[in-house]
Each structure stands twice: as structure tokens, then as C-alpha cells.
């Protein structure tokens, strides 16, 4: 079994060698870490960057860099680059 959640349907799973996180489809989307080492660190870095609902939209070979979209109720959405080697999050594009 890949993932199980009694409270909601799983609407998206990110695959690599091992899926690092999954996303719930209940009232507010939220990412849930499956891999306790890497994904929790990623989610903590993203939560520290700014509030918003996150969606993992792409990744580089070997998952060194990850593109993430922040959906926000009070501002335009924002695409960021999560660099796992340097543990940084940088803005790449803000949608109008």
C-alpha cells in the first residue's frame, strides 16, 4: 500500500524512487510527509518561506531541486524553487 488516510481521499502522490509526500483532498489541501527524513525538512522549509497551500509541480533529476506552487487566498500564486542541496527557497514567478 502506498498511502492510507481515513479522513480524506488521496488526490496526488509524488513519485521518485520512493514517494516523499502525498496530498489530501479534504477541505484545505495539505501535504503529508511519507518519508520522515527528507519530506518533513522540505515541508518545514516551505512553511518557513510563507503561508499558502503548496503543490509540488516538478523536480530535477535526482530530486536536487523542486518546483513548488503556493496558492494563497489573499495574494497571487507564486512558483518557487526549493534547492535541497542548499536548503533554500527562492521565488521564480508570481502569477498575476
Image: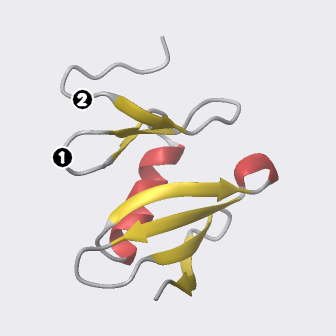
Residue most toward the top? 1
- 63 left or right of 20 in image: right
Q: Secondary structure at mark 2?
A: loop
Q: Could you say which is closer to the camera, residue 60 or residue 94?
A: 94
Residue at figure coordinates x 49%, y 83% from the top left? 95
Name above or below for residue 59 compared with residue 87.
above
Residue most toward the front? 96
Residue at figure coordinates x 28%, y 23% from the top left? 5
Residue at figure coordinates x 63%, y 29% from the top left? 18
Q: Could you say which is closer to the camera, residue 85 or residue 15?
A: 15
Q: Secondary structure at mark 1?
A: loop
Quarter of the image holding residue 57? bottom right
Q: Could you say which is closer to the camera, residue 25 or residue 61?
A: 25
- Residue 72: image location, x then y, percent: 30, 73
The residue singled out by tag 1 in the image is 27
Q: Earlier in the sequence, mark 1 or mark 2?
A: 2
The residue singled out by tag 2 in the image is 8
Residue at figure coordinates x 71%, y 51% from the top left? 63
Quarter of the image holding residue 7? top left
Amino acid at each position: 500500500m502506498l498511502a492510507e488516510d481515513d479522513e480524506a481521499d488521496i488526490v496526488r502522490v509524488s513519485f521518485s524512487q520512493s514517494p516523499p509526500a502525498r496530498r489530501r483532498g479534504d477541505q484545505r489541501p495539505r501535504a503529508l510527509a511519507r518519508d520522515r527524513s527528507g519530506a518533513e525538512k522540505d515541508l518545514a522549509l516551505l512553511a518557513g518561506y510563507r503561508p499558502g497551500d503548496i503543490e509540488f509541480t516538478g523536480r530535477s533529476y535526482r530530486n536536487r531541486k523542486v518546483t513548488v506552487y503556493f496558492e494563497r487566498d489573499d495574494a497571487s500564486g507564486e512558483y518557487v524553487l526549493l534547492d535541497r542541496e542548499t536548503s533554500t527557497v527562492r521565488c521564480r514567478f508570481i502569477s498575476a
